Image: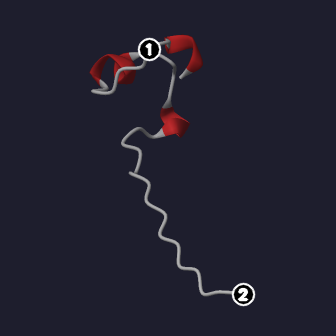
Amino acid sequence: MGDFRVKIRKKSRLIDESKCIACGQCAEKCPKKVPDEFNM
């Protein structure tokens, strides 16, 4: 049908999720704010 080209861009995570202990320090330092923390 056609020639489609897709480029997927996703910034790498700076947090190693396997070492996460849910302390919340990353959320404190994260520059992005969300209107509802429950539904991030």
Label 1: which residue? 35
Residue 16, horizontal then vertical, whole percent: 45, 40
- 31 left or right, relative to 40: left
In depth, the one of 12 and 40 nearer the eye is: 40
Instruction: Give the alpha-carbon distance from disc 1 to disc 2, as whole Å.
Output: 42 Å
In depth, the one of 18 and 29 nearer the eye is: 29
Residue at horizontal 58 percent and vertical 18 percent from the top: 39
Vertical order, 15 against 20 (above or below):
below
Vertical order, 19 against 34 (above or below):
below
Residue 15, horizontal then vertical, whole percent: 41, 38
Label 1: element kind: loop
- 2 left or right, relative to 32: right
Residue at horizontal 35 percent and vertical 20 percent from the top: 33
Circle 1/circle 2 CB separation < 8 Å: no
Vertical order, 31 against 8 (above or below):
above
Task: Name the colouring of the figure.
Answer: secondary structure
Vertical order, 32 against 9 (above or below):
above
Residue 19, horizontal then vertical, whole percent: 49, 34
Amino acid identity at mark 1: Pro
Query: Total label count?
Result: 2
Mark found first going from the N terminus, 1 or 2 = 2
Q: Residues within 10 Å of mark 2 (few under 14, many from 20)?
A: few
Amino acid identity at mark 2: Met
The quadrant of the picture occupied by the N terminus is bottom right
Label 2: which residue? 1
Q: Residues within 10 Å of mark 1 (few under 14, many from 20)?
A: few
Label 2: element kind: loop
